[in-house]
Amino acid sequence: MENARAAPTAEKLLAPLVTMQPLSEAIGMEIVGLDLREDLPQTMFEAIRDAWRTNCVILLRGQTLDEAAQVRFAQLFGDLGKVLHAHEGRSSLPGVMYISNIRENGKLIGALPDGEMYFHSDQCYIEKPSVGTMLYAMEVPSRGGDTIFANMFAAYDALSNDLKSKIEGRLALNVYDYHMVKTHPFTGRKALYVNRLMTHHVVGMDAQESDDLLARLFDHQEQDNFRYRHVWTPGDLIMWDNRSALHARSDFDASERRLMRRTVVVREHAT
């Protein structure tokens, strides 16, 4: 496979007590030793940003973040999207959204409350999809509600040359037209850009041919060898690149509380 990931060994990240180590052989990097409430030196941020762009997912455990601290970190990467559908005024900041099944006075305090979610890329159905999503765990169920990530750089690299040729230059309809293959603006690598939850059909193909092609691509991109499954612990912060990673959610007991805080980067800083 092209651009194979390095073996899972830790390396120092510009400071003696800060290290970076792969989450799995498939996708992701864990950054260890940072407190995101503190200001990051520019060189440290650049190393984190480069790890995110290259490895699709970054994880920082053991954080204690209020809304302002999470927004401040997210804004280092770019401009944040506004939340269009607020839930009972839960957030005091326009770029903060809560993902939760908790109800107060009979009303949900967050969005996307319960159940399993198929693999998808956030906001892939709008003209300019978001580039990154950041999720911070506050309350998690005793089991389930895991987030599974899949590496679309690796999924594209593993396609046969015949299938690469078949999808090159084609559009898939995710409620809005978009390419089936996306070239990352910073790494230059190609990623497979379709998903089971939101991709409806391939533009210009008859229905049966489109269904057959998408079924092949969905089965291919969801293989275990492209995945990392994250079991959440309160204090975990994960940011993923929507241009190169898919994510899904496993089911969980709806009677147990789950509370996550989300910020979305809609335009990345160029440097």
Image (cartoon, rainbow, N blue to C red):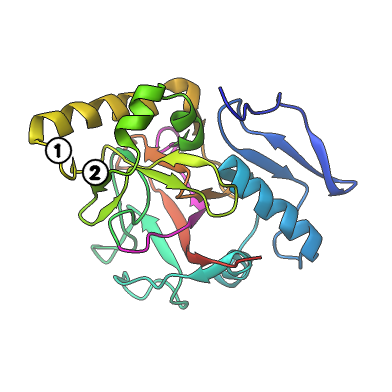
Classify the position of the N terminus by image quarter: top right
Of the residues shown, which amino acid type is indicated by label 1? Met
Point out the stretch of residues depicted in magenta. Answer: 127-148
**For residue 47, side relative to residue 113 (left or right):** right
Q: Is residue 226 above or below residue 82?
A: above
Q: Quadrant of residue 266?
A: bottom left
**For residue 145, side relative to residue 196 (left or right):** right
Q: Which mark is residue 199?
A: 2
Instruction: Work out which residue is located at the far right of the displayed protein and give it.
Output: 16
**For residue 241, side relative to residue 21 (left or right):** left
Label 2: how many Cα within 10 Å (few below 14, some 14–19, many 20+): many
Q: Position of residue 41 (x, y in %)?
A: 80, 64
* Kind of element beneath mark 1: loop
Q: In the rendered image, which residue does mark 1 sit on?
A: 205
Q: Residue at x 50, y 36 (%)?
A: 153
Q: Residue at x 78, y 48 (%)?
A: 33
Disc 1 versus disc 2: distance between alpha carbons?
14 Å
